[in-house]
Image (cartoon, coloured by chain):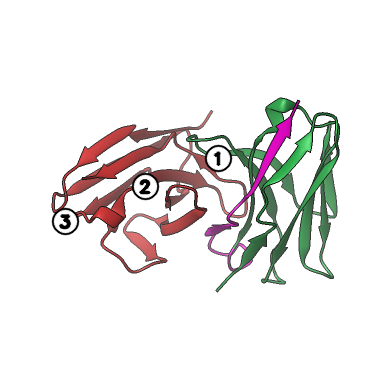
């Protein structure tokens, strides 16, 4: 079963570029979504939460499309420090038990 | 504020030896607790999750087991490690429907 699928990447972009990742989910009852950032050999850290149509935080924008069952992450004006793996997450069964299923992640590499 | 502690940070164990990784959470009660494994260059694989003391759900049948003897303690164990058990093990906690917070992980190498 594949509850959450992500663009495999890697995405190699120059500094200043705008880049977008998509994440599709299979459970139409999912109510909450999260984007995490994971640096090499480190634990994932929360980047953004999405409970409605979308969320914006500085250069980062997450959008939710319930009809097509995908969530996207847009990064504007990419920085070298944005290089990481980005993970999409949603509770597997809509959240009643809280078991969180992660996508395999999309690797981003921002080049000077 | 809530904190999560996971130890040890790194571990090298011989094949066939037992394993015990411990994770504790502070500053919250009745959290959902998770064990994930990440093999080199791979995604996060959910191994076990728990919604309460003594309640363990296994996502993938394998050489590992988990226990939750106390509300904020989650233990990952194995009686006999295999080479394929090597990986980065992450403990996490969450409240229902909210984001998960991770421990710093244990890098296990089975030799």
- Chain letter corresponding to the colour green: A
Residue B87 shows which numbered tag? Answer: 2
Q: Is residue B81 left or right of residue B7?
A: left
Output the letter for the chain in red: B
The residues colored magenta run A92-112
> Pointer 3: what residue?
B80
Instruction: Choose between B21 and A14: the one closer to the eye.
Output: A14
The residue positioned 68% from the left and 41% from the top of the image is: A108
Residue A33, above or below B2 = below
**Residue in view at x 50 percent, y 37 percent:** A43
Tag nearer the camera, 2 or 1: 2
Let me know if residue A57 is in the magenta part.
no
Q: With A100 as the anchor, is A5 left or right in this view?
A: right
Residue at x-position 23% and y-position 38% = B12
CA neighbours of label 2 inside 10 A, class few (<14), some (14 to 19), many (20+): many
**Residue A44 marker:** 1
Q: Is residue B23 visible?
A: no
Letter of the chain that mark 1 sits on in the rendering: A
- Residue displayed at 36% across by 61% down: B55
């Amino acid at each position: 079963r594949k509850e959450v699928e992500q663009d495999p990447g890697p995405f190699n972009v120059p500094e200043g570029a705008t880049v977008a990742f998509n994440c599709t989910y299979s459970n139409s009852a999912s109510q909450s979504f999260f984007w995490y950032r994971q640096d090499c050999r480190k634990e994932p850290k929360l980047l953004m939460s999405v409970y409605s149509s979308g969320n914006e935080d500085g250069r980062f924008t997450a959008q939710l499309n319930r009809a097509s069952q995908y969530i996207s992450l847009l990064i504007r004006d990419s920085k070298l420090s944005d290089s990481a793996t980005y993970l999409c997450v949603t509770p597997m069964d809509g959240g009643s038990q809280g078991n969180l299923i992660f996508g395999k992640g999309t690797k981003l590499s921002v080049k000077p | 504020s809530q904190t999560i502690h996971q130890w040890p940070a790194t571990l090298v164990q011989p094949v066939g030896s037992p394993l015990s990784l411990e994770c504790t959470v502070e500053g919250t009660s009745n959290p959902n607790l998770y064990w994930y494994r990440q093999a080199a260059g791979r995604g996060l694989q959910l191994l076990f999750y728990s919604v309460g003391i003594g309640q363990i759900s296994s996502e993938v049948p394998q050489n590992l087991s988990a226990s939750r003897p106390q509300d904020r303690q989650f233990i990952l164990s194995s009686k006999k490690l295999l080479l394929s058990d090597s990986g980065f093990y992450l403990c996490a906690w969450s409240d229902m429907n909210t984001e998960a917070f991770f421990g710093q992980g244990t890098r296990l190498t089975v030799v």
